[in-house]
Every structure is written in structure tokens, then in C-alpha cells.
Amino acid sequence: MLNREIPFRPRLEGDFRIRFYNAVSRITENTTLADIENIADEEIKWVTSECTFNLNQRKKYRAVWFLFRDLIHASWKAFYRDGVLYMNLPTLNENSTHDGSAPEVKQLLRSWMSESRHERLLTFTDFIKHMEARNSAGYDISELIADGPELANRLEQAHAGRISVKQAIQPYLQLVTENERDQFTGLKISEIWRYFRLTWSTPSETTPGRTMQYLIRDAAHPMHAVMGIASLENCAVQITCRDDYIGWNQHAFIENILTLSGDDARLEFQRLLGYIEDGISGIDYSELCTEMTVRNPTDEDIRMLLDFAADAEQQRQDSLRNSSENGYNDDERSELGSISTKTEQALYNRKRAEQLARLLIAKKTLTDVVNDPGYDENWINFCKSETGSSVIRNALVAQKAKHIGSSLMELNVCGAIPPYNEILGGKLVALLATSPQVVHDYKTRYENKASEIASRLKGQPVCRPAELVYVGTTSLYYVGSSQYNRLKIPGEVFGSDFDVVWKRLGMTIGFGTMHISKATTLSLTEATSDGFNRINHVFGEGASPKMRLLTMAIRELLEATNEDSKDFSKHAMSRIVYGACLATNTSDYLLGKDDRPHYYTDMEQYETGTQKIIDYWSERWLSSRLNYEPIYERIRAFDKNAFMVGNQIDGEKEWSFPQLEVAQMPANDEAKAGLQFVRDFYRGSSGYADHIAPERLSLIHLKTRLDSAIIDAAKDGKDIVLTGNPGDGKTHIIRIMKPALEKLGKPIEIVLDASTLSNREIFDGWVNAHDNGKAFVIAINAAVLYSVNKEYGSAFAPIAEAYRAMTSSIVFHSEESNPDSVVVFDLSKREVLTQEVLAQAITKLTSKEHYKECDGCPLHADCVVTRNRALLNGALFQKRLSIVLERVVLQGYHATLREMQSLIAFLIFGNRTCKQLNQTAGNDEYDIANLVYAGKGGLFDAIRRSIDPVKISHPLWDEKIILNDLEADSWVESYKIPAETIAYDNDELFKLRKRQFYFFNTHGEELLKILDDDVSKFQAFLQQNDKKIVKELIRKINAFFGSAKPSNSEMKIWSGHRFDNEPRKVLISIGTQKASSFSIGRPMLQKNMQAGIEMIPNYVRFEKKDAANIFLKIDFDMYLLLSEAERGVPVLFLESDLVKKVWRFIEQLQSFNGIEEDIVSINLLDIQNKKRIDVMIDREDKKYLSVNSSRTEEA
């Protein structure tokens, strides 16, 4: 059967994400395993050998495909549907698999592991050849593999009674020790064990910690052939069914304590507090906190410990990164292995702080419970709460920590070597793993050996009792029979009533790494290294380095929930968990109730005791097995040569794992003058005309009507003044126009940049030009012209005329004041954020003339500069970007040409060098749709304020974007997106796709149709006729002063008094102005200036008719203020410049408020007390007619 469907969504970006979904979109429910594997192999080949950009994404891409392939090999089912790659975890358990299919299931499980095993064998080729070649004594490893016929003959003689069973097979245990050699072959014992481990179907892995390896030898064989091998290693910290059995699981503990009385429960709580105190005493907290903190911890103390732990983890990662980049000396190497002492110190600082924080939380909480006056009423609720469960768990973990590394071992290798498997040699190995010799060897090896983790936590050597009381294991397969079934050492063997039983405790849920190949492991390490290895196979970092790597990689490489991440760590190879207690009081000893274990026999007599177990096996299992006739033929047929590991390696396959590296580096940026020139428009020097070579200048010049206007003015012999702000392009234009001006044949004097001259030099130059009959052409900043006019305007009329033309360049009612002898073009009034200018600027800056050096670059084909240049030239993109820029203009931002060019340069390069372009190509951050909103500077700030598709919610198109329910041909031809449905919680990807939709999809403008923001309203406001604008402004200003139902036909004129600049507290209105007394002034350029400059009006003036000098400028900011007032926001109370401008306008209007009627209505607004008072007076009779008071609705 199959489990639920799990989305497989890699955290890939750009081209890599597109390519991944294009590939997996070919996978359906009917796609064969071979075809899926071919797809994976094609992608791995592409990213390994062909892809030349973005090394980080390449590493992730390859790791994702390796992981995907391993899951497929482990019988996960994959299929693409509706934009999602789904995967099903196969469940192979006793409920879905009949016993009759057990051999097939076992073969399937072996096949899952075969590739990982073969990869591992290929890495050991030299070792295997060494073991299978004859040594100087003339022996090789085959001497230690029993010959089938020879063993069969011995067994047949025993079966016939010619020799005893004990004579036929004479097993004994041999502990593997370093550098010891076999007395028969001269081979190292450790290498013998290692060779036979390679015959296992499971790939071999090494883990840090305590290890005991054994050979089981047959003394009846001439060379003492190897019957089996065993290995005991540190237990996994978390095995739920084992912890339930021992009493270390909080759920079992809570279930038990709830059956007790309150007093008995209190005793259990006291025992938990004892565990906690023991745990605290095992931590060196001298640098973490005081004794007082430990005795009476506070929440703040605990928070500081957690902060310390977080800082230590950051220091560990920094140290790992530094060691990876710079290396370290041998004297800096930690005893733990492949890390520095500094990294080790940071690791254990973190562990100390984390563990102490957990223990102090548990201590504080549990102490409060025990001492609670309402204990009898509250303790049960505490046990049932999440807090109670966490506290009890932490206390039990502290007790477990005392024993998990010293009193328990895991039998992780246990089995017979053929042909001894036919006589149940595996059961013998399993029995001997619980033998007195193993207990004795363990105590001998480790009784005086300090516990590495405990010692480092304590800051001094900690030697825990090496009393082995429990051996656990898991079956390789969960179906069919197991060598642990019904396996025990009866108590009568040792004259007691205690049986040593391999007890079935439960099942694992299939977490593990057996299905993960070595190539995948290396690829995951490469993809998650972040410049250093975070998983270092160092004892103390955590259990199962490979499992931690897999878990971390899934979390970092896939967009998955916690639940899905856990499922991706499953291999469906559930196993049966067994445990054997070696003491009659194993649980009580491990729970701290007893001080020492009571073993099932006298462990001092370990040789005798172990022989009793061997004799028991011979009588119980071997003797009965000899009655099974088929074994003799099978043993005779055993092919020793086929069993040899070297014959199981495909000689044609040499395993290798090529590290991904930068394929080729782009050419040096300094060698690319044209490209560098364009790039430097963004926050560089290219925008300054005086820094640009003439040939480059002509390549970026935008030809507009200003060019013709300058020529026409020069033909008329007029002085020409180009003024404005820095960056407007004044010097640039004159440098470009200079040759054409000089060809006119008119006498002319040209000053390219007045900023390089003093006021006197400008004045003298201008006067001299006139004295010599020459027209004067100058590029001069407005500030400089102001200064020159102030100093010399009265002495020289052209200067005064130029200044006057600049300051009166904008008119509102057709009045003209064009000077006769000087033509002024104020480029600060020129609007460059138009679609026409944008298109020209893009054409110029993307011209191939700037990128000739790129043609020879080996990375040219995949260069994002080439792609972005093409995208920028798309008509749809330019149209959509122009809409954004139009809104920038509406909000009052004036951009210079230099800023426009800076924007385009940033969209091409993203402020990256060629090397950085190659490293980041395809990253979502640098997608051109994101770059529009990513730059630095005033224009980019204005763009971010103007319109961002991300902020427009559309009920129809948002769903289509998420579901990828968009016609393929609705995207511009050169723009591609992944064929995927976006995960509901992937906000960043949705934001990117929303922007891509706006700029590159034909339906993108649909977002604007529901736009109802203030910019859109202001745009509509400006497009109204004058009469409607007047009415709207009257209504808004009345609302500004608190009118609940503001009129649009007459405007109340208010006054207010203030003392020492304090806010006005009472407002008084004693008159109104009708709509007919106002007019609208729309800005336009003087006629001469219009000939060369296009201006886009982005404001109007609200003027008093017949008194145009009394006006309120209604730009976007003022419109926004008045709109806020109309929405009920009390902006009247703000002390802003905009509010002051409204007051100034109203105060100017008061002088026109003549009152002629006898009966007058006066309105008072008490701001402080939120009251409105309406007073009616008769001026002729000098009396009050009425006084009405009410609460203001909006004050």
C-alpha cells in the first residue's frame, strides 16, 4: 500500500527551478522506473558536466536529483500532477505483506541497498585486493573462509555419530584489538573483521564512540575459519520502544504515575528531582552562572543561558568556516577528530548551556509543583499538561544520559559468514553478544576510560561504571523469520531462574539512511556546507552523522513542512527492535533505584560462562539442525570464489564523485571597457559627461526635440543657456551638440561646464563673447546661475534675462515673458521618465557596441547580461515599467537622466561584476522583475513607493498565478517560469511570480484595473476639468477643518489663535468663500522652453480668482493629506509643513472675507474638548439670536 502524497519541492531558483520542473513534468503515474532514472541521470550529467554558472545552485540541483533518485530506488513512487511533483512513501509491513512473500520482500530490500553497498565497495578496491592477495607468508583471506565440502564432511560425521557435535564445530569469541595479527595467516585481526563486514548487504558506516568488534572462529577448522562477526557500538539515544521498556519514556512514566496516590506520586517527583540534580552536577557551569542561580533559577537566568548557547553555536559555525578557509595547525586539532580545539570549545559551551537551561527549567517547575500548597489538587493536571510532559522528559533524559553511553550497547553487526549460516551461526553470534566474555571485555576496556562527552561537559575526567547490562539490536528485515526469534539463554544453563532473552520490544518506523548512497551523502554535504562542514563525524556533535546530514539537507533543500521532512527521512525499511537484559535488575539499575547490577551469572568466570553458552547452542540449535538433510547439499554447493568480495565488484565501474567547481572564470572586468562603462552608470562615474570619451558619449546620447531647439536658437544667433540640477545632462548635451553648432558657421563661444569656472570668469567670458559678436552657449547649474546673477545680473542684461527665464519658466495662465536675446532650457523641468525616453535609453545602453568584448567570453551563452538586455528591449516590459515610472512622476519625484541610466544599468547587471554575475546567475534575488524594486537611491525609493504588484491583491489572477493556470503563450516569448504550483506558504516565490506576471505576462495589466490607491485617485483627480477639481478641493478642505458633511459649493474660512506656537485649541469661522471665487492653475512651460523640453504636470494650483498669488499647491503629498482628512483622520492636529501650508492659504483668504449681512452665523470648534458651538448674532441689534453646542463626530 502507499502512504499519503507528499509534495517534493526543491528550494531551487531561476533556471534551475525551471529546468527541474520541466524535467519532472515528464513523470506520470505510468512512467517506468527506468525512465525516471534516465531523467535523473540526464539532469545529474547536465549539472555536473555542462552547466557553467551559479556554483551554489548547481550543488543544490545535483543534491536534489541524487536524493530523488535514492528515494526512487527505495521504491518511493513519483508522479507530476497539476504543477506539483508528488511522492508516495511505500509501506511494506506485516499487514500488507504475507509471510509467503517474505523472500521477495527481503530481495527488494537488498536491492534498495545494493547501489549504496556497491559504491562503498568501489572505494575499498585497494583494500579488497590487498586482502585477497597472498601475503609474505603465502596466505590470503580465503584461508579463513570455510570450504563447503570440508565443512559438510565434518557435519555428516557428527550426524552419523562418528564424532561428537562439539568436535565437529568448536566456536570461540575473538575480540578485535588494534594491530593484533592472526596467528594462522598473519593478517591483521581488524582487517579480517573489516573484510567480512564488506560481505554484508548493508553498506558499512563508521560512527564515533565506543566500539567492540568480534570474530567468531571455528577451532575445528585447520585455519580457525571465521564463523561470524559481531560489533557492539554506542546505542542510538532515541529508540522509543526501548525507552518504554526500560522506563525512560515520559509517556510510560506519566501513565504509571497517574495510577499512584498523591503521596506516592510525590516520591516519584522527588526521584525526578534527584535525576535533575545529578544532571546539573555533571555540568561545569562556572562560566555560565553562579551557585545561587543553580539553587534558585529565575526565568531571566534561563533566558541568558539560552542566549549564551545561541552565541556559542554561532561561534562554532564561525570557527568551522574559518578552519575551512584558513586551516589550522596540528597543535590546534581537537582530540575529537576533524575539528579545531576552538570549535570543540564552542560546541561544548553550547551543550553545557543548553543542557543546564533545560535542567534548570525542569528543576524550577518540578520544585514549584512539589511545594505547591495545592499539590493534591494540581499534580494530576501537571502530569497531563505539555509542560509536565516536557519537564518529566528532561528529568528522565538526565538519568538516561548517565547510562546510555556506558551501560548499554547496540549490536549493530551480527551474523554468520557462509557457509556457517546454514547451521544457524547467526543465532550463535547473537547469543555470544550477551555472553560473560563480552561483559568482561567491555569492563576491561572501558572501566578506567573517561567518558568523552561527560568529561567535556564536566570539565574534568568522568569515569562512569562500565557495567554492561543491556544489549539491543534491530533485525535487518521485518518480514519472515529472524535469527532473534525465540532466542534465549535459559536460566538452567547457569543454575538460575533468570532467562537471558532476546525480547521483541517493538518496531522502528523506518527512519534511517540505509537507502542513501555515498554519492548522495557527498552531494548533500557539498550542497549544505555553506563554506564549511557542519556535520563532522565528531563524537558529541550528535547521534548518527549521516542521519543528521540527511535531516539537515531535507530541511534546507526542500520546501517541506516538519511532518513532510520527517517522512522524507523514511526508507520504509521498518525493523524489529530486540533487547536483552544481562542483569536481573537491569531496569532498576538504569533508573537509579539500585546501585549495582545483579548479573545472570558470575562474570568473573567469564570463560566458563561463555563456553556454557556455546555448548547450549550446540545442543539446542546445532544438533537439531544436523537433522535437516538439505543443508548438506547447500553447504557442499557453497562457492567460495563467488563469495569473495573482489568478485562482486564490477571491474568496469570505477566509482568517483567529481566535486563541482567553477567551470571557467569570466574574463577580467577591467578588460571590458564597454561593459564596464554601462555598469558604472549605477553608482559609478559613467553618468558624468566630463568623464566620458566622445565616442562613448555618442553611443548613449538620446536624440530629442531639444537637439533641434538648440540648433534653431543658434541659427537665430541667440545665447543658449542649459540649466538645471546636477545630473540633468547639460554638459552631455552641449558636448554632443558642439560639432553641429560649430558647423553652422555662426560665431559662437561654448562653455561645457560652468562649475569649473568662477563667477567672474563666467561673466567675463559672456561679455567678451558679445563684444566679439559671438553667441554664448553655456551649461550651468541653477545654483551657479543664481550666484552669477546675484553678483553680475545688474551689470549685464543677458545674465539677468537668463536668470529671469529660469525662475519664471513655469506659467499657469498663458502669460509669456520670453527674453529676446537668450534662450533658456531648464532641464530640471524636463521629464525623462516617459516611455519614449525610456525606450531610447534602453536601446542605447543595451546596444551591442558596448558588449563587443563579451563575444569571446566562454560564459557568454549563459550570461544574464545577454538575457537581461533582451528582456529590457521587450515592448511589454517597457510599457509596464513606464506605468510604474508614470506613477513616480505623479508622486512628485523628478528624476535626472543620469538616474534613468542608473536604473537601466542596474536592471542589466544588478550591481554585479562578471564574476558575481556567474556566481549568482538565476538567483531569484537578481531576477529582473525583482531588480526593479531592489536598487539604492532616490529613484528606486520612489519606484518602491509608486506601485508594486506584490501589494495588489486580485481574487482571480492571484489564484491563477499560484496554480500556474496561465496560458503558456501569455508570457512573452523570451521569458520562462517553472511549470509548478506555488506552495501556499512560499511567500517569496509568490511575490516574485506576481512581479513577473505584471512585467512579462499579457494579462499583467489586469492588476491595475482593480487598483484603488491614492496615486490612482490623484491621477484621476488631475484629469478632471477645473470646475470638478474646485468642488473636490472645497469638500476636502472643509473636511480638513472637521466638517462631518462637508460642502463642495462653499468653503468656510477659519481662523485660530495660538500662544507661543502651541497648537490651536479653538477655531472660529465667520464666513465662507463660494466655489465661483476659485480657479485652477495648471503648470506649463514658457513657449521658448516648450520647444525643447517636455514637462508632465503633476500638480495644480488652487487659486483665489483674480488673486493668483494666493494659492494652495495641490501636489500628491497635499492631495494625500486632504484625502486623509476626508477619510476622518484628524490631520488638523499635525504640526507638519503641509498643514502649515493649508493654514497659510486660509489666512490669506481671510482678507477677502467681507461680511455685509446684519445676521451673522459664527462657528466655533473647541478642539481640546471636542465640541462645536454655533452662534447666531444680530449685528444691527447687537444681540445673540441663538447658541447651540454639540459634540464633534470626528474630533
Image (cartoon, helix red, strand yellow):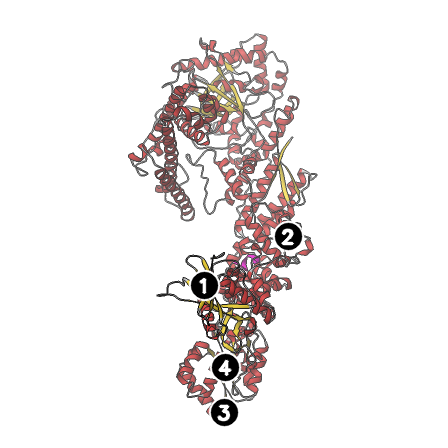
Up the image or down, 26 lies above or below 242; here it is below
Q: Quadrant of residue 2?
A: top right
Three-letter amino acid code at the position of disc 2: Trp
Name the residue carrying label 2.
Answer: 957
> Secondary structure beneath disc 3?
loop
Q: Earlier in the sequence, mark 3 or mark 1?
A: 3
Residue at image position (63%, 40%) is 86
Name the residue carrying label 1.
Answer: 1164
> Is residue 932 part of the magenta span, yes or no?
yes
Three-letter amino acid code at the position of disc 1: Leu
Q: Earlier in the sequence, mark 1 or mark 4?
A: 4
x and y percent of residue 777 in the render?
Answer: 50, 83
User: Between marks 1 and 4, how big is the CA–CA gap?
Assistant: 46 Å
Q: Which numbered mark, 1 or 2, is in the foreground of this view?
A: 1
Crowdedness of circle 3 by 10 Å Cα count: few (<14), some, many (20+)? some
Q: In which quarter of the image is residue 96?
A: top right
x and y percent of residue 605 in the render?
Answer: 39, 14
Magenta segment boundaries in residue numbering: 928-933
Report the number of discs. Answer: 4
